[in-house]
Amino acid sequence: MALARRGHGWWPYWFPLGSFLLIGSFTSWFPESIQPWLLPVKVVVPAALFLYYWQQGEYPELRSFRSSGAGILMDVVVGVAGAALWMAPYVVVEEWRPDEAWDPNRLGEDLVLLTLGVRCIGYGVVTPFIEELFMRSWLLRYAEVFDRRVDFRDVPIAHFSWRSFLIMTVFFTVGHVPWEWPVCVLWVAGTTAWFYYRRQLGSLVIVHAASNLSIFAVVLATSWGTDARMDLWFFL
């Protein structure tokens, strides 16, 4: 049973994503020998905060998720299509690929499977939950009422207005590195349109997870091992 409302209700949405961003920002403060080992911390802390608030009865928008198998399958299809949209320009045009890349050997060659596993969980499971809760549950609704004395929780999930749509799209996009902005804008706009159609946050978590896991799978299939055909580690 969800808790009775108290306070402004922001922290369950802010703290998981905020911890993820802060840990990433503070990584450079540590010696280079320690920095790679912060990868598990960057996954465990946001996941632990999400699970803590879940056990406290928060996130009614996730608890109310109901869908048929066909609906979930369509969410997955939309997510895979979103991954194709995200990757295609940089796969086709090599000159557009950024110089920086994620290193699967960052914990050492003997721990590459552990490194990939932690990255997969963080990228494909934890991130979809904490980003969707912040961006398309809290921010999309808060943008509707920030200039009025209205609780964001009074705004229905997936309620459309141009103001909230544009604010969330810009905020979501600038939270990514600049080379991702062109594809991020399209991905966010398209998946938000799907959100307005499905009207369930759980649907968007599935879409987001399907996109990220598809990207992860393509990177492994094309860029890992002695028979790697291209270097796409920058996507991760």
Image (spheres, rainbow, N blue to C red):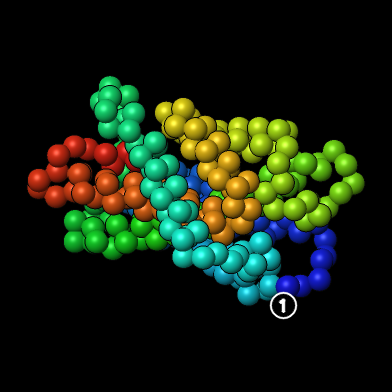
Other-residue count near label 1 (Cα within 10 Å), few / some / many at <14 / 14–19 / ≥20? few
Along the line of sight, which residue is nearer the eye, 36 or 230?
230
The residue beneath circle 1 is 1
Q: Nearer the viewer, residue 117 or 83?
A: 83
Residue 209, percent across and down?
44, 54
x then y, percent, for residue 141: 73, 47
In this rendered view, identify the residue nearer to me: 25 or 76. Answer: 76
- What residue is shown at x 55% (from left), y 36% (from top)? 189
Residue type beneath disc 1: Met
Question: Residue 212's x, y, as percent?
Answer: 40, 50
Residue drawn at point x = 34 percent, y = 28 percent: 89
Q: For the view shown, which residue lies furthest in the left direction?
A: 226
- Count of labels shown? 1
Quarter of the rendering occupied by the C terminus: top left
Residue 114: in sight, yes or no?
A: yes
Q: Nearer the viewer, residue 232 or 153?
A: 153
User: Which residue appears at 14% of the width and 43% of the height?
Assistant: 228
